[in-house]
Amino acid sequence: MAKVLLEMKSITKTFPGVKALDNVNLKVAEGEIHALVGENGAGKSTLMNVLSGIYPFGTYEGDIVYDGEVCRFHKIKDSEKKGIVIIHQELALVPYLTIGENMFLGNEQGSKWCIDWNKTYAEADKYLEMVGLTDSSKTLIKDIGTGKQQLVEIAKALAKNAKLLILDEPTSSLNETDSRALLDLMKKLQKEQGMTMIIISHKLNEVSYVADKITVVRDGSTIETLDSKTDDISETRIIKGMVGREITDRFPKRHDVRIGDVMMEVNNWTVYHPEFSERKVVDDVSINVRSGEVVGIYGLMGAGRTELAMSIFGRSYGIGISGELKLGGRRVTLKSPKMAIKAGLAYVTEDRKGNGLVLSNSILRNTTLANLEGVSTGGIFLDQDKETEVAQEYVEKLRTKTPSVEQLVGNLSGGNQQKVLLAKWMFANPDVLILDEPTRGIDVGAKYEIYCIINDLAKAGKSVIMISSELPEVIGMSDRIYIMNQAKIVGEMKASEATQENIMACIVGVRGESENAESVNADSVGSEA
Amino acid sequence: MNGFDMKNVMKKNVMALALLGIYILFIILGFVIKGQNILAPAIVTSLIERNAYVFILGAGMLMCMLTGGNIDLSVGSVVCFIGSVVGLFSVENRLLDQWFGVWEEQVIDGEVTKVLVQHAQPLNTPLAILVALAVGLLYGALLGFLIAYVRIPPWIATLAGYLAFRGLGTQVLTKASADAALSNFPESLKNIFGGSVLEYIRINGEKVYLDVLGMNIPCVLAGVLASAAVIFIMIISRKKKVAKGYQADPKWFVALKCVILTAIIMFFAIEFSFEGGIPVVVLWIGGVLILYGIITEKTTIGRHFMTVGGNAESARLSGINNRLVMFFAYLNMAVLTVIAAMIVTVRASAANSTAGEEYELDAIAACIVGGVSAYGGSGTIVGMVVGATMIGVINQGMQLIGVDQNWIKIVKGLVLLAAVVFEIVSKNSNKKKASKKKTAEEATKQLEDVAEKAAEELVAGTTVEADAEPDVEIPEGGIAISESQ
């Protein structure tokens, strides 16, 4: 057995009110590629942030033993000095600097006061060659593609004398070819330099392909570590570890809900990425939802779920949107969120802090924001008494815990913020609610209450589309489930027939085919252009 | 929970209290240093009139800043330019003659020269105002378009205006008159943007002054009416709240508010009545402030502005047209700039090339000192008025004590800085308090969960998404740690 390079012993990290990591143990041997997998928010990134010193020593409990000694990192520089380099999911390169400048940013070559540019570029070229990038190190970052940028990041890490390389979702923004190239590079680095690497990824096929060991993280704890030599590391096996919870009665039952006519229908919906305009983020998707029905859309992160929802909601995301949208049987074109709201749609965002709530405003103001007409005369003059009444009503109805409706939303807990967000959209009185990860980042008690609200909405004859990456939630809450993967709907089933296994089978089964399909697509797009 | 809390009231009005403190401080300093009341009522009223432009530009600047801390650097130069436009069209001048005058060719000393035989007729007052307004609207629309739709950062777009309009205004004035200033505005124009209301009436062509004991009667009456209106509104709105069962301030507090407001109104009414009546400028200020007070506090439009500043993405997904809001912020600013330009020009009785210098900074400073968030999303007209007045009082007070101009600038700079530091520090301390409270609340909640739920669920109950890590906590991490150690 190889020498253990890194051992994280019973790491516990608490954020106000919640435990993000609970007694996590991780062992990484020298020269291996170790994969960390888990659902969104299972604690993978938090763990790596603890390791790299982003959460400094003292803010967590437990020990980090690296290269035989206990480490106390106070900042990223400390861990980098030891050779632990983390490459984040969002690339941290400066677009208008050259590859060379970026590689040695904060690590400039030359004397203390003067940068030796010749040395910089010579060194840069050396490392670029190592990662198999043929571009000149004087090329600007903005002129190379995302795949190459990812390679530059790795070269940059190598230039820092990395011994342990942590890659956080390195392939999330890459296409298949670039991803494969990156994975092969990882294998090459492992073989030629004996580099130790930790990879965090949602793409399980890649994990199976590249990793020697796989550690599954779930709900802030490490569940198991699989060894590629001795254990079964098929995707199904990994997923079992990832979601291996039992579905208990965490989900309230709906009784006597009449499922009516089709309320919303989306046909052949295709959306392109707003920046990389040749990339399809939603590909020929057709879905529908009936009144009184809760439809789940399951998919891993990056499957195109949010993009689908937002593009339906008044084209608030994406370009080149094509397809047909029918509301109550009538074909409609919704050009702005305003039109979408008028037409009876509501999109409850997954990112409540980023684009859902105005944190610096009160509960009252947030509640009425999407339907100011409802609390004003002539659409102009606000009736502030009525606003208070409405906000109060929803606080009581949804049991939001707050001293008053004047409380700033930024001061509420996640669960209560989510309730305010729901209140806002319920007050807009939509027919169709699209809930994007409605229970993300809130505790089980609050989740249950949110589920009850969803049931009440269905009871009231609303159509609910619930996007979620939590399998038990999707199975427990939906009447019908769509499974989305790589921009496509890859399966549809009744909740009564759904199991974790057959949902996963849809994703795994189609993955192989979709690779072929995608290359065909790429060809056809190319020929059209 | 009892809604009324004296501490909260003090907190909300901290700037007004500071203003009062500064006012008293200067009075004391005046007696000590100069042996007289340097902020006598008459001086205060003239201060208001002289700073009229700050209130009006401040209202526009407030709307811009609400949309996300955006500012308009061009207002001072535009004031100068609009002044020159008004002068150009309402006063006889060289440029107008050149364009529209009647010229004849005459032979003088054997040479053929063009000679002006008839001056060009200036526009009448309403038309001149309309031209100025049209110019302002055109500029505002262009600026709004560039900022909202072409996405030019506001401070750059308006910096361009700052440079260009100062030059353009000066150019017009130098072309139009020998001394680069246009004066002799028609009386009708002066009466719309200056002078006093109902100082006298004409009976059979004779002026009859409406005075009793040197006090202008209409002015006093207006003060009484305004006071009555304020008291009436206060009482009615409290009654409405009580009737509907909402939280209402206690009676004595409403009474106190009425007394304070009435005292302020009557103070000015009586002062103005000694000086010949309500100054027209005060009507303009009052009109603009009330209008914008209503817009920001009571209408959906104001709510849109605040939301765009508070969280633009959230606003967009709530059906608010962010770009339109930005567009209107700058269009509106231009309209108010026209009004301010008229007032300033009439007050100076001349359009000149130094008009409006640093006005943009005065307006921005008034907003900032008045607690308008430098990041957008919050701010009130009342706050801006308090800020403007505070700067005015400091300025005037120090001048009268005999402080050097340069020192006044230094002090003003420090006051501005202090206001922003105060805003940010108090916001942060609120946040910290709230997050501590939150932790405690959630801890108790979790304890409840323990009691209620089975052990296996408890494990799940204490889990959380990494994504849910409060963004707030990370920057504050450093502080939190040092506290816990």
Image (tube, coloured by chain):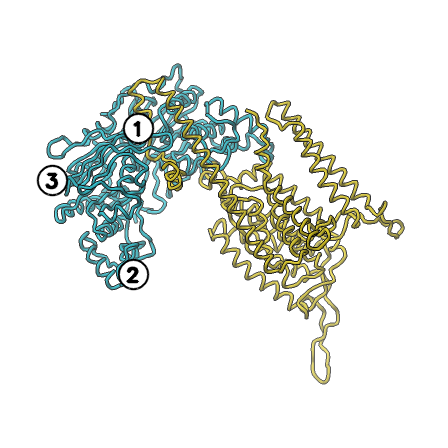
Chain shown cyan: that is A
Q: Colour of chain B?
A: yellow
Question: In the current view of this chain or complex, which residue is farthest to the front?
Answer: B32
Q: Is residue A414 left or right of residue B384?
A: left
Residue A296, by quadrant, is top left
Which secondary structure, mark 3? loop
Q: Tell me the amino acid under the disc marked 2.
A: Lys
Q: Is residue A466 left or right of residue A378?
A: left
The lab-note entry on whether marks 1 and 2 share a chain reads yes
Q: Residue B182: percent from the left, percent from the top?
A: 69, 64
Question: What's the mark number on residue A309?
Answer: none
Reading the image, the residue beneath label 3 is A2
The lab-note entry on whether marks 1 and 3 share a chain reads yes
Quadrant where the image shows the N terminus of chain A: top left
User: In the rendered image of this protein, does residue B485 appear above or below residue B410?
Assistant: above
The chain containing the residue under callout 2 comes to A
Between the residue at mark 1 and the residue at mark 3, the CA separation in whole angstroms equals 36 Å
The chain containing the residue under callout 3 comes to A
Q: Tell me the amino acid under the disc marked 1.
A: Glu
Q: Nearer the viewer, residue A14 or B374?
A: A14
Between the residue at mark 2 and the residue at mark 3, the CA separation in whole angstroms equals 39 Å
Q: Nearer the viewer, mark 1 or mark 3?
A: 3
Between the residue at mark 1 and the residue at mark 2, the CA separation in whole angstroms equals 51 Å
Which tag, 1 or 2, sits closer to the chain's start? Answer: 2
The answer to whether residue A329 is seen in the rendering is no
User: Badge 2: how crowded within 10 Å, few (<14), some, or many (20+)?
Assistant: few
